[in-house]
Amino acid sequence: MRVDLFDFDLPDDLIAQRPASPRDSARLLDATADGLQDRLVRDLPDLLRRSDLLVFNDTKVIPARLKGVRGGAAGRQDVAVEALLIRDLGGGRWLSFARPTRRLRPGDELAFAGGLGAKVEAKREDGSVVLAFESFGPAFMASLEKGGAVPLPPYIRGGVADAQDRADYQTLFARYDGSVAAPTAGLHFTPGLMTALAAAGIATAGVTLHVGAGTFQPVRARDTDAHTMHAEWGEVPEQTARAVEATRAAGGRVVSIGTTALRLLETVARDHDGALKAWTGETDIFIVPGFRFRAVDLLLTNFHLPRSTLFMLVAAFAGLERMKRAYAHAIRERYRFYSYGDCCLLRR
């Protein structure tokens, strides 16, 4: 499909720079009926059914933005370096974006804040690099906590994070280190809201998708067929797979909290003829209109960038024209957009 079909104009002042406080006071555009209703996230228990199952992404954002220096060697000058870790390749090796990329060569040694040392192992055609760190596992994560910064997207205060973002850019469900971007729909949930959902008889389950920067990269191609998604690692536990299948058998609905959980559930369903199984692996699924959804009935998601893979996904889920009307309403009513912004509830 033509990428320009997914374009729209968004005033800059609607891009949220901080989350709502408390989190469940964020606005929610209910698009599950024929019309559009303005609600709040804390109204969610009233919008769902007792037999519904909410599926959250329990990944944890790591302080993946690093600053350091390339040491001078063989007559080369020291160079200030910034790196954004994208994906853990194992054994201390990380796929990363780094700058200035053109001044880095395989074999260059880099020293980052927090005592982290790395070597440039390889440069790839897409502009990414593979960094091989001297440590991995718990020791690496401890150094990363000391020297790394929260990897805010550039549309939030120029990507410059502060101490408050350490808490703000992490969901209530965060358990497993690995994401370089938050599964932002999960940012709206509070302990009080979870208590209210449980009291309403609404069940919950978790999956893990370590969100990489590729999910949020702009689509520069003119046609969706020419865009390539970066792979991301995910896991559907046996307990969650059984919960999804039991919900379906009982006539309930599967509600994905965010596009990341949806992408993982639909990857597994696609690969197992519609069934949900315990699964571990990598997914590069790219969902555009025409995709056949098999796992998810409702989707709670934030408002996304124009021409992004995520806006394409919600257009595939709820219909492009319907989403254009919903986004026009959100802009007119001054909903807050993107990672720290408001959200909408969609049905397919």
Image: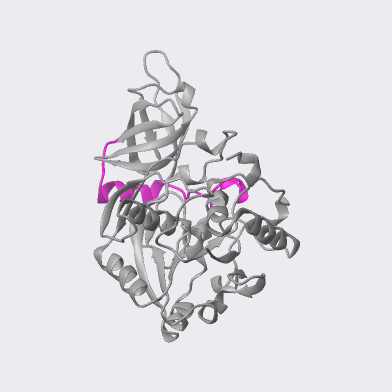
Residue at (61, 46) in percent of width and height: 158
Give the residue at the far top of this rendering: 75
Q: Quadrant of residue 266?
A: bottom left
Residue drawn 65% across the image and 40% down it: 4
Image height of 96 relative to 249, above or below: above
Q: With 268 as the anchor, is 35 left or right in this view?
A: right
Along the line of sight, the residue nearer the viewer: 13 or 233: 233
**Compared with residue 271, is residue 91 higher up or lower down, i.e. above or below?**
above
Image quadrant containing the N terminus? top right
Q: Find the residue positioned furthest to the bottom.
A: 199
Q: Does the magenta stretch include residue 85?
A: no
Where residue 235 sits in the image (x, y, percent)?
Answer: 30, 56
Bounds of the magenta span?
A: 133-161
Could you say where residue 29 lies in the image, as x and y percent from the top left? 63, 68
Q: What residue appears at the point 36 percent right and 71 percent down from the top-left corner?
A: 248
Q: Nearer the viewer, residue 115 or 145?
A: 145
Mark count: 0
Q: Where residue 241 sits in the image (x, y, percent)?
A: 29, 65
Furthest-right residue in view?
A: 332
287 or 110: nearer the viewer: 287
The residue located at (35%, 32%) in the rendering is 130
Residue 156, magenta (yes or no): yes
Q: Nearer the viewer, residue 257 or 67?
A: 257
Residue 263: image x %, image y %? Answer: 42, 54
Is residue 16 visible from the viewing direction of this image? no
